Image: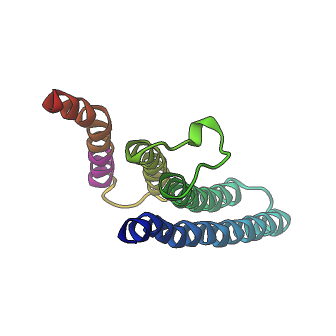
Amino acid sequence: MMRRLLSSSKYIMILPALSNVMAVLVLMIYSTIQTFVAVIGLLQRSFTDGLSKSVVFDAAINFLEIADIVLLATVILVIGLGLYELFISQLNLPGWLLIRNLDDLKDKLISTVVAVISILFLGAVVNNIPNLLPFGASVALVIVALAIFTNWVPSWKKKSQQ
């Protein structure tokens, strides 16, 4: 009885997996709407102001912000699919998205987080934020820490287990 109850408790992970997929759906719909709004705004401004450098620059910033939303949605999707694959059942996913253990999920998550952080930094550069150097240094520090975590921590674990 207890064994069956504990064994079936893995299905609790359906809730976060499905909620992540629903969140991704909402973010993708939002980013699609924002893309249409940005394109329409670009067309309107190009007819009234001409296709000036500032119009194109503003459109590029809008599209970078939309790309950031899509990348965040990708992170959430990877987490949702990874939870489902780890706890419930295997899915028919492309090879690059297969998740066999928590380390696979961690690696995929970290690589998408690095992409999101890079887009955030690019947005900061484009928006010409003040104190860009400390922001860039902190971004670089986070990426270096993640690289160390993904590349050297597993080898330290293997050495300590031997």
Of the pair 103 and 69, the residue shown nearer to us: 103
Q: Residue furthest front?
A: 1
Task: State which region is magenta.
Answer: 133-142
Magenta stretch: helix, strand or loop mostly: helix
Of the pair 75 and 137, the residue shown nearer to us: 75
Residue 145 image offset from top left, x and y in percent: 26, 43
What residue is drawn where x is 26% and y is 45%?
A: 141
What residue is drawn where x is 58% and y is 62%?
A: 69
Of the pair 32 and 5, the residue shown nearer to us: 5
**Residue 146 appears in which quarter of the rendering?**
top left
- Judge from the rendering whether residue 18 lies leftward or rightward of residue 99; answer left or right: right
Residue 99 image offset from top left, x and y in percent: 51, 44
- Judge from the rendering whether residue 71 lies leftward or rightward of residue 106; answer left or right: right
Residue 18 counted in the magenta span: no
Name above or below for residue 46 compared with residue 157. below
Tell me the quadrant of the picture where the C terminus can be found: top left
